[in-house]
Image (tube, helix red, strand yellow):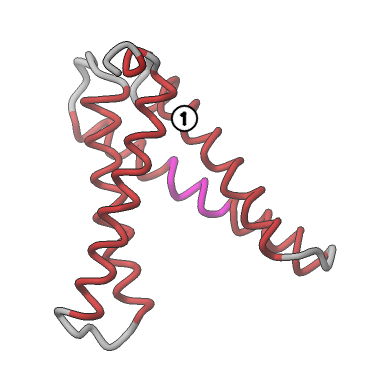
Amino acid sequence: MLRVLQHQPIRYILNGIAATCVSYSVLYACLHLAHVPSAGIANFVAAVIGITVSFFGNRHFVFPGSRELVWQQLTRFWLLYAVLALMQGTVMFLWSDLAGLDYRAGFLLGTFLQMVCSYYGGKHWVFKQ
């Protein structure tokens, strides 16, 4: 198992799964424990926490060894995720709204593109490896 963790893309996938689990757990806690009345607000809170967890996982587990200040990387990371959210929204708009294709396939396509761009953006721009 430890040999598998030597591969950066595997660590990236594991970090993404962990961050998604945290995000969903926060969403659930907001709705069912804290009784936040809006799923949209609860999801926003969950997304911010999930993305932050993803950042620290990427910094220390996926792309370790950086000597750059955390705030510089965090700024680039949030900017990257903002661009990726716009990209995914654009893909969904073009795929489903303009082309009239199934939104589920558009979601999968957008998510795949976001995952690939996030990996390479993190590696080469945010954490500069």
Compared with 22, 43 (above or below) is below
Q: Amino acid at mark 1?
A: Tyr
Q: Residue 33, relative to residue 109: is it above or below?
A: below
User: Residue 81 lies in magenta, yes or no?
Assistant: yes
Magenta range: 80-86
At which x and y percent is residue 32? 21, 80
Horizontal and vertical percent for residue 46? 28, 63
Q: Residue at x 37, y 40 (%)?
A: 16
Name the residue tied to disc 1: 119
Q: Nearer the viewer, residue 25 or 100?
A: 25
Q: Secondary structure at mark 1?
A: helix
The location of residue 56, given as percent across then percent down, is: 22, 36
Residue sitting at 69 percent across and 56 percent down?
Answer: 106
Q: Nearer the viewer, residue 75 or 8?
A: 8
Report the predominant secondary structure element of the magenta stretch: helix
The answer to which image quadrant residue 97 occupies is bottom right
Q: Position of residue 128 (x, y in %)?
A: 37, 17
Depicted 19 relative to depicted 32: above or below:
above
* Label 1: few (<14), some (14–19) or many (≥20) C-alpha neighbours in 10 Å: some
Q: Nearer the viewer, residue 49 or 17?
A: 17
